[in-house]
Image (cartoon, rainbow, N blue to C red):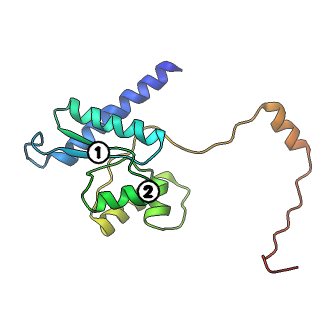
Amino acid sequence: MKRLHRLLLLSFLALLTVGILIACANGQNNTQTAIKVGSKDFTEQFIVGEMYALTLEQAGFTVERKLNLGGTPVAQAALENAEIDLYPEYTGTGLLTVLKLPALSNPQEVLQTVSRGYQQKYNLTWLDPAPMNNTQALAMTEAGAKNLRSEPSPKWSLKPMNSP
């Protein structure tokens, strides 16, 4: 399992390095201007933001870290105002929170919609996604699952708030 995690991490870093270098290159000497890497205000974002920064530094870029900015609206505003150059974002958050579009279930469709939406609305480019997935899931024991399958389904009733 550790070998799989290491392989995924190395794949992620390689893909990230190539994507960031292409996005930042534009034929300029990029070591003179610091690339401002931001992140939102929770552990996973700190780690991925730091990974971006370290990868860029290892490729020879100067990096200014602006980690722990706040929630999505704060990080997005910093990106729009050029206070940061990039930050890790989830396609689902980009779709629902930033672009305020309806939910989609196909990951490829979400990525295409978000990429197109950010380009049109903000003139921002989404890099290729990491090979990892941050899908939410529920885990339980097999015994618990069998127990729930044997019970009858609950009868749910939804009523408007103002009804008796």
Residue 33 x %, y %: 13, 45
- Between the residue at mark 2 and the residue at mark 1, the CA separation in whole angstroms equals 15 Å
Q: Give the residue type at disc 1.
A: Val
Query: What residue is pinned by disc 2?
Result: 72
In the rendered image, which quarter is residue 94 located in?
bottom left
> Is label 2 in contact with label 1 (beta carbons under 8 Å)?
no
Residue 51 x %, y %: 34, 34
Vertical comparison of 2 with 73: above or below: above
Which quarter shows the N terminus?
top right
Work out whether residue 112 or residue 36 is closer to the camera in this orientation and state it. Answer: 36
Residue at 92% over, 50% down = 152
Residue 39 x %, y %: 37, 46
Query: What residue is pinned by disc 1?
Result: 37
Residue at 45% over, 54% down = 71
Q: Residue 76, can we see it?
A: yes
Mark 1: give few (<14), some (14-19) or many (20+) Cα within 10 Å. Answer: many
Q: Secondary structure at mark 2?
A: helix
| In the image: residue 123, left or right of residue 152 | left
Q: Secondary structure at mark 1?
A: strand
Residue at 88% over, 56% down = 154
Which comes before the other along the chain, label 2 or label 1? 1
Q: Residue 109, can we see it?
A: no
Vertical comparison of 79 with 133: above or below: below
Residue at 81% over, 38% down = 145
Q: Give the residue type at disc 2.
A: Thr
Residue 4 x %, y %: 48, 23
